[in-house]
Image (cartoon, grey):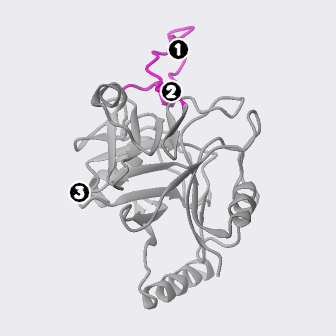
Amino acid sequence: MLYFRTLLTAIALLAMRGALSAETIEHAGTHYWVYRLDPKKEALELHLPEKAGEPNTFPKLAASVEKAGRRLVFAMNAGIFEGNFRPTGLHISRGREITPLNLDVYTKRSPEEPTPNFFLKPNGVFFLRSDGSPGILESTAFGASGEKPVLATQSGPLLVRAGTIHPVLQPDSTSKRYRNGVGVASNGQVLLVCSVLKRDQGMSNLYRFAELFRDKLDCPDALYLDGDISYVHIRGLTGPVEETNWFAGILAITEPTP
């Protein structure tokens, strides 16, 4: 109860300042942090590790932006990555392509082997154009679109596509994990979502996570980013920046240090 009283107090304080952009939402018994971003008013950035082969963490990112006279408002891990902390799929930061679009088909070594989430086709790309407008496209469609975004992250599966949940996902799946993802709402907002990091509150299967975007957040398109390693920082709500799991890309919002 203390957790939720503290949360409600923090949200009330943000509301009084006219800056309410984050909240917790419950769906099918799971609680999620939801950050609502208007990309034409607030800049979303994608940060990769400063050194190749080394992990990215929230404290490292916080220290890096502080050197530039800024501080973290929001941070959440981006798409799936390899063991060398190189993104598995397309990552574009500040208009520069870090890793290319990945249209590979995963080859199973046995019929029983599960397909990794990234390769559960259709997968997709979340991106921002230079004018701030967001989009989520199936990966092949993105490659053919001619889009030249300033920010992009590719991951999978594509949870919701034009209002339809990914055909592989099942409502009764017993695979429950922390989840994080991104959706584009009908009003053009970007919805950045991460499970509440409490085992008794934050675990869900992929179908229910997709359903959250479609049915509660009004997102006709939504992309899964990652699973149990997921982490989120929202200044003033989730506590101080602390040591996290290791990542490749981190999606972040910063502001000038007062």
Answer with the quarter of the image where residue 224 lies. top left
Is residue 154 shown to the viewer in this render?
yes
For the residue pair 190 and 99, the one nearer the viewer reads as 99
- Residues at circles 2 and 3 in contact by the CB criterion of under 8 Å: no
The residue beneath circle 1 is: 112
Q: Label 3: few (<14), some or many (≥20) within 10 Å? A: few
The residue beneath circle 2 is: 100
Q: Residue at 46% x, 57% y: name it.
A: 193
Q: Label 1: few (<14), some or many (≥20) within 10 Å? A: few
Which numbered tag is attached to residue 186? 3
Q: Dot 3: what SS?
A: loop
Q: Dot 2: what SS?
A: loop
Which numbered tag is attached to residue 129? none
Q: Residue at 34% x, 24% y: name it.
A: 140
Three-letter amino acid code at the position of disc 3: Ser
Q: CA distance from mark 1 to mark 3?
A: 39 Å
- In this rendering, the answer to whether 252 lies above or below 152 is below
**Image: magenta residue range:** 99-121
- In this rendering, the answer to whether 81 lies above or below 223 is above
Is residue 175 shown to the viewer in this render?
no
Instruction: Of the two numbered discs 2 and 3 on the same chain, state the one appearing first in sequence.
Output: 2
| Picture coordinates of residue 196, whole percent (x, y) | 56, 61
Three-letter amino acid code at the position of disc 2: Pro
Q: Is residue 238 left or right of residue 190?
A: right
| Picture coordinates of residue 7, whole percent (x, y) | 55, 79
Instruction: Of the two numbered discs 1 and 2 on the same chain, state the one appearing first in sequence.
Output: 2
- In this rendering, the answer to whether 158 lies above or below 217 is above
